[in-house]
Image (cartoon, rainbow, N blue to C red):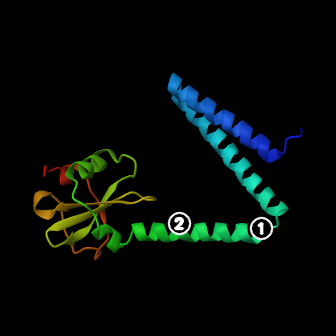
Amino acid sequence: MKKSWPQILLLIGFLLAAFGFTLATAGAPLFSVIMFLVGLALFVAGLGAAIVRFAIRRRLVPHLLLLVAGLTLAAFVQHRHCFSLAYIRGAHEDPYRLWITALKGIGVGPVYYIGSEGEFSYFRAGTVFADRFKAPTAKIRLPRTFPLGSKEPYRVTAEMVNYSA
């Protein structure tokens, strides 16, 4: 049986990603990440080629383009919502996560002070996927405060938000 290019890319990508994962567990971190990412890229390319090939054969190209446009629009709307003030206001008070995120920037990135409203100060972390936090303004040490969303956010350090609930 003759293999097509999408099938070959899928197979090679899967094998390289699995090999990279195995190397990571064996203690070769740099090479394993490279192997895993190359394998993942080949796998995604093969999957994309297989989907396009299927759409062309079944005459579903307009449907495929509509699906891609819809997913792109949904991702854009979700991204914009994560940086809106309505999303920020829905934050829960979690002093440990706020402090550890400001200290290490684990997962999402640096923490920014967005503003204060009532007795709480609001924070956002991340550049692509945003996370939100709030803390009582009286318990934290910020250099300056301002109403929520009225000025440019500034970066927060762990010393500014270190408090226990």
- Percent across and percent down for residue 130 are 39, 60
The residue depicted at 20 percent of the width and 65 percent of the height is 121
The residue at which mark 1 appears reads as 61
What amino acid type should be assigned to the residue bearing mark 2?
Answer: Ala
Q: Residue furthest left?
A: 138
Q: Position of residue 87 (x, y in %)?
A: 34, 69
Instruction: State the residue at coordinates (62%, 32%).
Output: 18
Seen from the viewer's position, the closer of residues 130 and 59 is: 59
Q: Amino acid at mark 1?
A: Val
Where does the image place residue 4, in percent across and percent down from the top left? 84, 45
Q: Is 24 placed above or below 64 here?
A: above
Say left or right for 136 vs 90.
left
Label 2 sits on residue: 75
Which residue is pictured at 22% across the width and 54% down the height?
A: 94
Q: Residues within 10 Å of mark 2 (few under 14, many from 20)?
A: few
Quadrant of the rendered image containing residue 143: bottom left
Q: Tell whether 29 sits left or right of 159.
A: right
Q: Position of residue 85 (x, y in %)?
A: 33, 73
Q: Is residue 96 left or right of residue 51?
A: left
User: In this figure, what is the number of numbered marks?
Assistant: 2
The residue sitting at the top extreme is 26
Circle 1 residues within 10 Å: few <14, some 14–19, many ≥20 = some
Circle 2: element type? helix
Disc 2 vs disc 1: which is toward the camera? Answer: 1
Spot the residue most to the right.
Answer: 1
The N terminus, quarter of image: top right
- Name the disc covering residue 14, or none: none
Determine the secondary structure under disc 1: helix
Q: CA distance from mark 2 to mark 1?
A: 21 Å
Nearest to N terminus: mark 2 or mark 1: 1
The one nearer the camera, 94 or 115, is: 94
